[in-house]
Amino acid sequence: MIVVKMGGAEGIDMQALCGDVATLVQGGQRMVLVHGGSHETNVLSTKLGHPPRLVTSVSGHQSRYTDRETLEIFAMVVAGKVNKRLVECLQGVGVNAIGLSGVDGRLLEGRRKSVLRIVEEGRTLLLRDEWSGVVERVNVSLLTCLLEHGYTPVIAPLAVSYEGEMLNVDGDRAAAALAGALGAETLVLLSNVPGLLANFPDENSLIPHIGRNELETRAACAQGRMKKKVLGASEALEGGVGRVVIADGRVPAPVSRALAGQGTVIQ
């Protein structure tokens, strides 16, 4: 079992990803795909007059402030446009993909973080009306049923709270939760860079291997979205995943390359 997360930034080659997934699935590999949608959400929310607000938590993680309007725009993009484009692409290359969000069938459940503690201009502030959370439970039986009947699940990073509210969740961490729950051998996190870089944005400074004991230090030094990827890698390994590969999603056969060790291998 392999779980693959396709990043939501610009530059990811969806056609190359889908062709590679088709080769692997048709060769007998079971896979679950998770995807983002951050760039497309930013574009649409700006067009709709509700531009994104990025905030930094007290722990140093940057995220999207998700009020209810932002949540609905995000859901429209990731569960609608991006998810269905991926499913269409996979169907076109012979993969019987099925698109879901984490809300469907309570696939991904977690607790809502209704208040965010952020740091802004050196001050700690509280932001209310937040509609995000962290995945705490995975409906493994639903995924297992789909996989056993020959479907390849494609999952949008939304979850449902225990009270039935839709939540925005981080895609890398959602993929980590899914990989752990499914007992995946490998979690592949595809991005628009070759992997974790020692001197961002210098792509020649790729770090090819990281041991588990280095993750906390690397997370503290990582830039931007890479912080979430390193955190997701840590959570996946804690959940029993054999290894995590942060790899380039802009290249031909991106998943196969990652499985061959091209990228940053964490184990």
Image (cartoon, rainbow, N blue to C red):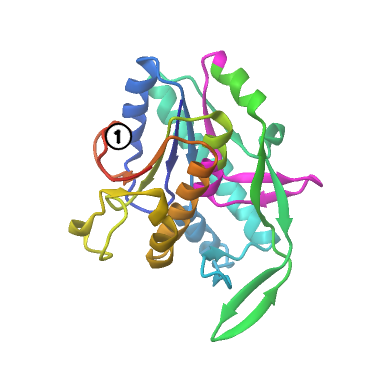
The residue at the far front in this view is 213
Measured as percent of width and height from the top left, residue 223 is found at 38, 65
Pick the residue in front: 267 or 11: 267
The residue at the far left in this view is 204
Q: Is residue 185 left or right of residue 194?
A: right
Pick the residue in front: 192 or 247: 247
**Picture layout, residue 47 above or below residue 181:** below
| Residue 28 is inside the magenta segment | no
**Picture layout, residue 171 above or below residue 113:** above
Amino acid found under the numbered disc labelled 1? Ala
Residue drawn 38% across the image and 63% down it: 222
| Residue 168 is inside the magenta segment | yes
Q: Is residue 224 left or right of residue 151?
A: left
- Residue 156 in which image quadrant: top right
**Picture layout, residue 227 above or below residue 134:** below
Residue drawn 45% across the image and 47% down it: 233
Measured as percent of width and height from the top left, residue 165 is found at 76, 48
Measured as percent of width and height from the top left, residue 28 is found at 39, 15
Residue drawn 42% across the image and 48% down it: 7
Measured as percent of width and height from the top left, residue 242 is found at 43, 35
- Residue 86 in which image quadrant: top left
Q: Which residue is mark 1?
A: 16
Q: Is residue 32 left or right of residue 217?
A: right
Q: Is residue 266 left or right of residue 169?
A: left
Location of the C terminus by quadrant is top left
Pick the residue in front: 94 or 231: 231
- Residue 53 in which image quadrant: bottom right
Badge 1 marks a residue whose secondary structure is helix
The residue segment tinted magenta is 148-176
